[in-house]
Amino acid sequence: MARAPRHAVVAALLCLAALLAGCTVGPSQRPPVAVRGESLPAPPTGAPIPDLPPELPEPEAQRATIPFFECTEDTLVTLPEPIPPDRQVEVDCGELTVPSDPDQPGVGAVTLGVIRVSAAGASPDRPPLLVLGDTTRDPAARQAAVLAGQVSPALLERYTLVGLDRRGAGSDILDCAPDDARSAIVDADPAAAGENALASLLERARAVVQECNLTLDGGLTVYRTSASAGDVELLRTALGVTRLSAIGYGDGAAALAMWARTSPESVGRLVLDGPPHPTMDEPDLSDAHAAAAEAAFGAFAVACTSRTDCPLGPDPRATVTGLVTQLRGRPLVAVDGQRLTAGAALTVVLNGLGEPRTWPALTAALAAAGAGDPGPMITLLEPVVGPRGRYDGMLATSCNDTRRRLAPGEIADLAERWRTAYPLFGSVFASRLLACAPWPTGGPTPPAGTADTAPPILVIGTAADPRGPLDGSRRVAESLGTARFLSWQGSGTGATRAPPA
């Protein structure tokens, strides 16, 4: 994929600046994908920030009732990258108690982590800007702190960033699957579509559902995006604002879209970055994700080969395909006994494609595995399937967000077709359908309401986003009465998450 023209990036910045009152939440000077030798137009100089639409509400001072406590050092030390030296931030931590099942308020409650990130010395009543992340990204509420290190310091002079844990992550981490069953699903041979292989994998999937249902006392279905929409409204009340401004990524953007449909009078300035298709169900949803993942890998490959020293050689797709084929026959064993299988390697790649900032580390890990060292790949896999990893929460949310369950025979047919259409990832997405096959049915109905009374909403779609295909984001914008749609010819989950300069 070619690099996005710089004037398109500037347009994204200006749209976001207008929506958030002159604060530049957006890509850096360059997108994460480049083509060697490409001639690009110079960015416009002195481009004025557009006038704010008159219907945008003024951000409100917060009057939070959550008992926050200072946790700056404990939070910042856990971030994947340090906060840049051009800003000093303070972090407060707290908790929000919400009904376990929003549809049945009397059946119990869960506690979600909340953090506030502000410029050092800022007034505690500075207007809040909620950051709601995708369930595949870590670390839940801490994504507000991650974003604080990426945005313009001007935004931190205007807002306090507020991060909210998604259900199944952070302080509400879902860790219920038997280790052997979870590993079997992740390690499953991506090319095995025979009856025996599918039957074995289905049994492992049943073991996950059975154990998690026992652990959660039947509450497995509360881990869904629609429940997060209700959590956002409760957070708005706890922050003491009439209208809450927010930015969401991936299925976090989907949760904010649902919130806007059900509570349009509560919406402030809203950015939905990469929301998935609002009504698509399986298997069409996985088909779209597989196609988007292949496109994202193409962008990853171009980013690597645009350098003179790409560790994956002149054809990264061939290199990774060869590694996967090698691992199918003989997994690599680390010094501590952990194995890197073909399925695990593709899980690492899929997870890494959504975050272009980590592509150099992913490239180096793949190159190391090709040289016989599985250690770096296993390290990248650890946050997903390791102790208190995010795999269980990701699986629960993705399965609960869909309504249709497919039979093994149907999945075998899809695996055969997708293996041809999507050579790297088709089989992986087919096996994920099997992981959801024994999941409770009766998922969410398509979202209703068009949020016609909400302020203007900015919806952004990214051309090579493995989590939210561009057309899905466009459909979300079409379904919201006040939405404006912006497409970005870049890659990764979240066009407004700036890559490193």
Image (tube, helix red, strand yellow):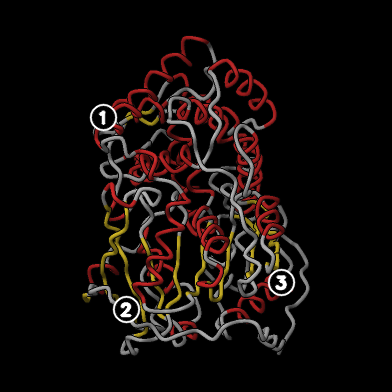
Q: What SS does tag 1 mark? A: loop
Q: What SS does tag 3 mark? A: helix
What is the three-letter code of the residue carrying label 3? Arg
Quarter location, residue 96 = bottom left
Q: Is residue 329 above or below residue 346?
A: above
Q: Is residue 205 left or right of residue 433?
A: left
What is the three-letter code of the residue carrying label 2? Ala
Label of residue 6 in the image: 3
Label of residue 337 in the image: 1
Label 1 environment density (alpha carbons within 10 Å; few <14, some 14–19, many ≥20): few
Q: Is residue 193 above or below residue 212?
A: above
What is the three-letter code of the residue carrying label 1? Gly
Q: Which of labels 3 and 2 is toward the front?
A: 2
Q: Depth check: 260 or 330 in front?
A: 260
Q: Which of labels 3 and 1 is toward the front?
A: 3
Q: x and y percent of residue 304 in the render?
A: 59, 51
